[in-house]
Every structure is written in structure tokens, then in C-alpha cells.
Image (spheres, helix red, strand yellow):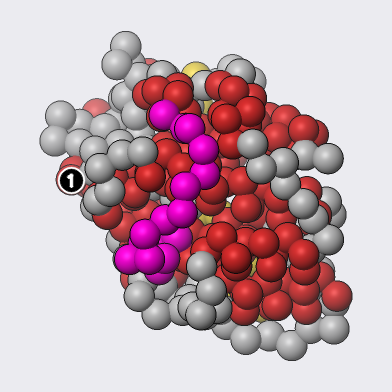
Amino acid sequence: MKLIVPNYYENFKCIADRCRHNCCIGWEIDIDKETLDFYRQVGGKLGKRLKEHISPENTPHFILNEQERCPFLNSRNLCDIITQLGEGGLCQICDDHPRFRNYYSDRIEMGIGLCCEAAGQLILSQQEKVTFSPIRSKDPFFRIRKQVFTALQDRSKTVEQRLKKMLVLCGSDLDPNLQDWAMFYKNLERLDPAWDQKLEQIQESSPLPMEWDIPFEQLSVYFAFRHLQPEQLAKRAAFVALSVKLIAAIFSAEEKTFDGLVELARLYSSEIEYSDENIERILDRIT
Ligand code: SF4
């Protein structure tokens, strides 16, 4: 099976103890069966800790402490499992994060998710047009998606014009009232109350200054690569455009810095992209 990744993929590196929003804090981490069997064989102090800090209930998982930290994330924000067993000691989820996969009949596509600040820095700082490993396909979906990437990377147009072209290519449309959308987003499942404050800043869609076109192009291509699917193509295209426009509207209301954009994208990704329930509810609202 062919593996397709964006050209920046291999440059991703976790920044570990320098990460401000460590993925080992605040998320329940499930442990796959193979790794659980392996952990049961580990002896010594680490083996004892593993036995004490894994819950076998429902899907086996690490028991987070009172600060919602993984019990193996030490005070220097380094993982005790890695330091003692090496990266090979990680469970599937920890080993994978922040990578995502989409499965198709002729390929697997992989990328890195914006909920990780190191991934956000890498994706949004790309200056050249992002490319993907070439693969010929007669599948109409991949043909349309190729046209979508070309449209989103057409630097003779504004990002707004490029998103409109994507909607046309996918036979889609989007309710343009971003304040209504912001109200709707406020009723979705919530992780961080800071997200509510961001949504409250949305007044209307205002044009982005040209100097931000390239990071917003990378954001658009990222969302299109990750979320466009043959099923519900029109709705998903609207979701891609909506995601970019909401982030742009919040960004426009703030002091515009690159780090601010990475943080905004991280927040959006954690609140929306990593909640299947939230994505379902948004797709349901898109007509
Ligand atoms: S969020 Fe990203 S950079 Fe931070 S600890 Fe997790 S993988 Fe590493």
C-alpha cells in the first residue's frame, strides 16, 4: 500500500520538555493490547509503577494524576518510559501522536496534527507550496482534490478567493455569517475555556493582510488534506473553509504574530479536530 505524506512530514520533531501544551497533560491515553502485554513483563521499579498507574477498566489507560498529567511525565516534562525503555517502550498512541492517518483503497495518507505546537510551527512556517508524494489515480475524488490543492496554492489570488474556488470545485457552499457560527461553536464540547474567549472576539470576516497569505495557504492545504473525503465531500469542503475563516477572523481581531497564529491553530485543532463528536455536529449543521 502506497504511503502519502506532505513534504515537511519527515522534519517533524517533538520538542518534549520545551512544549507548552504537552500532549501528556489533559488527555486520557489509551494503551493498546500489545504494549499492555509488554508492560506486564517489565520488572523492577518501573514495572511496579506501570502496574500501579494503569487502569484496566474499559480500554486500558494511564491513570492521570490530580493535575491531569500522565503519571510517567516527570517534573522536567520528560517521559520516564522513554528515558528508561527507549522510544520502543511507548504505546501506539504515544508513539503516533501527533500523526494522523486516512485510509483509502489504494493508499494510506499520513500527516501531523495542528494540536501539537511543534507541528503547527513546522506546517505554518513552510514558505514553498506543500507537495505530496505523487501517485496516479483515476478516482474522481483524488482528481478533484488535486484541483483543490492547485486552487488553494494559487498565489495570484487572495486566500478568500482560493477558498471560494475550492467550494465551487466540491459543489459546496457556506453560510457566511461567522458570528452565527461562533455561537454554534460555543455550544460544542469544550476542553479549554480560553476557546470561548477566542470565539467571542469574532465580529465579522475581515480581509487578511497579504503578508499572512502563505501561513493561511498552509492552513487551508492542511485542512483539505486531512478532512476532504469522498463521503460528504461538499460538507467537508465547507468545514475546511469554515475552519480557515474562523481562525482568520479571530486572528484579525488580535495582535498578529506567527506564534499567536500557531497557538490559535493549536487551540482550534484540540477543540474541534480531535473531537469526532464536534466535527459530526458541525457537518450536520452544514446544509
Ligand atoms: S504536543 Fe507535540 S511537541 Fe508537545 S510533547 Fe506532544 S508531540 Fe511533543
x then y, percent, for residue 70? 34, 27
228 in the magenta segment: no
* Label 1 CB-ligand 1 distance < 8 A: yes
Circle 1 crowding by C-alpha within 10 Å: few under 14, some 14–19, many from 20: few
Q: Which residue is found at the position 45% from the left and 60% from the top?
A: 216
Residue 128, quarter of the rendered image: bottom left
Quadrant in the picture for residue 66? top left
**In the visual, does 246 lie left or right of 65?**
right
Residue lying at 41% horizontally and 19% vertically, measured from the top left: 193
What kind of element bears circle 1?
Answer: helix
* Foreground pick, 228 / 251: 251
Q: Quadrant of the C terminus?
A: top right
Residue 139 locus on image (x, y percent): 85, 77
Question: Which quadrant is the N terminus positioned in?
Answer: bottom right
Q: Residue at x 66, y 43 (%)?
A: 176
Which residue is at the front of the view, 111 or 114?
114
- Image point (34%, 49%), residue name: 261
| Lateral position of residue 84 relative to residue 177, left or right | left
Residue matched to label 1: 18
Range of residues picked out in magenta: 201-216
Closer to us: 231 or 204? 204
Taking 98 as reference, is 221 above or below it? below
Residue 10 in view, yes or no = no
